[in-house]
Amino acid sequence: MKHMKICIVLLALLLAAMVMVPMVSATDDFRSPSNDKDLIESNYIPIDTAREQAAITMLSMIKSGALDENWVGASVNNEPVIIYDINGEMLFYQFFVEKDGKKTGQILSPSSKILGTMVKQIGDPATLDFYEVQKKAEQIVSTKYSRFTIQSSKIVSYSYPKMGVMIQLSNPISQEPKSIIIDAVDFSEIPEMMPLADGEPGAWSYYGQISEKTRLENIVHWDTQKKAGVSKERIMGTKALGEANYIQYFPTTDQEQTEWCAIASAWLITKFHYPTTSRTQTNVANNMNVYSNTGPAWDEEIQYYLDSYASGGLGKPNSYTDYWSGSPQDVTYEMIKTEINANRPLKISHNGHARTCIGYWQYTSGEKLYKFSDTWPSNPKTYWENPPNPYSSITGYMSYIITQQTHFSSEQEKEKE
């Protein structure tokens, strides 16, 4: 049976690769369709407007209970870090949130209406010093590519939510251009390809993942929200906005290897269910038959959740993964809401990165955000995030593991046998 599951994994990867080929060739550029550059730039959001909307969203989330008392009385600073997409266009403004002279949080606000929301991410402050990261990345590239000269360097979200530095080079003699992306954590050179598995390195355009139809819809969504004219004064006089719930005091950690996001997420969920556990990420990895810097096979990963705690697993025999259906399935708002209300964190993967989902928030306009505990070292430890489909019940996140279900379908039972 295990051999059959491995074959299924290989087939799924082959099919995924086959699907990706036309996606790349259809745009002629993996970074983003070139003919949409004008659309992105013509819908750039002024920094003052982005800051105002970030502050309004923060107040809304405080009122709804999505942000705790540590955010009360905080303010959004005036000077953001500009983060670019790998297609070269501005993608996010990163604002720090300050209280009593200290950084207490950060907000990623879209730089273009193309993203359709007022805020992409709001949560703990990240530990990155972008100035130092950029300087070190340039030194590494200058040494490795000594025949080239640096034309420009930008802070990029190269595989959201991972950050890095994109450096444009040129050969002074041949005029050959070259683009290099350096990760902000381990300063490794990142291949420009869509990751196929959790933890796999890769770089992809955020703008390039938004279809032409969705881009136009998102512009309308953004304009509609802006025209609604929600003010800080109105929010302060409102008891609550929307519905929200999240698991409080959830553990946080950094993953110990660059490809161990799924393993570290499993460790977090284990620590949540067994607070006094002495189990390490290495223990979890070994129980998934991982002994190096690689991610686990999906069948080994789900088996960890199913196995008893005494035998090294999570001890949740009714856990379920969407991979049993034969291919990843989008996660829904209702699914997340049900699990969080039952105090059950769930693992969610998207574009090569696994995180633990620990909360949901739905604004009165229908916009939705989800709270994550993230193990990538440079990222905030916990934050709220707008999903790929912020106004839909279908979130756009691609796959999941639910740590406890009441029953299985007959097809799922056959897969377990």
Image (cartoon, rainbow, N blue to C red):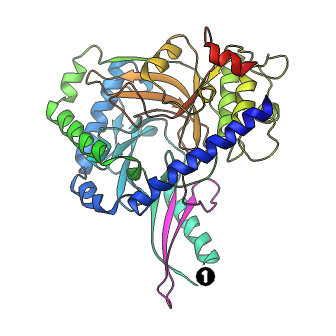
Quadrant location, the N terminus? top right
- State which quadrant residue 74 falls in: top left
Residue 26 position within the rendered picture, expressed as x and y whole percent measured from the top left: 40, 57
Question: Is 13 or 354 nearer to us in this picture?
Answer: 13
Amino acid on which the number 1 mark rests in the picture: Ser
**Span shown in magenta:** 164-193
Whether residue 40 sits left or right of residue 74 in the image: it is left
Q: Is residue 189 magenta?
A: yes
Residue 284 position within the rendered picture, expressed as x and y whole percent measured from the top left: 77, 31
Question: Is 383 or 312 nearer to us in this picture?
Answer: 312
Whether residue 197 sits left or right of residue 129 in the image: it is right
Can residue 83 be spotted in the picture?
yes
Residue at 51 percent across and 16 percent down: it is 340
What residue is pinned by disc 1? 146
Identity of the residue furthest to the right in this view: 311
Q: What element carries label 1?
A: loop
Can residue 68 be spotted in the picture?
no
Residue at 26 percent across and 37 percent down: it is 53
Q: In this view, does 149 lie above or below 87?
A: below
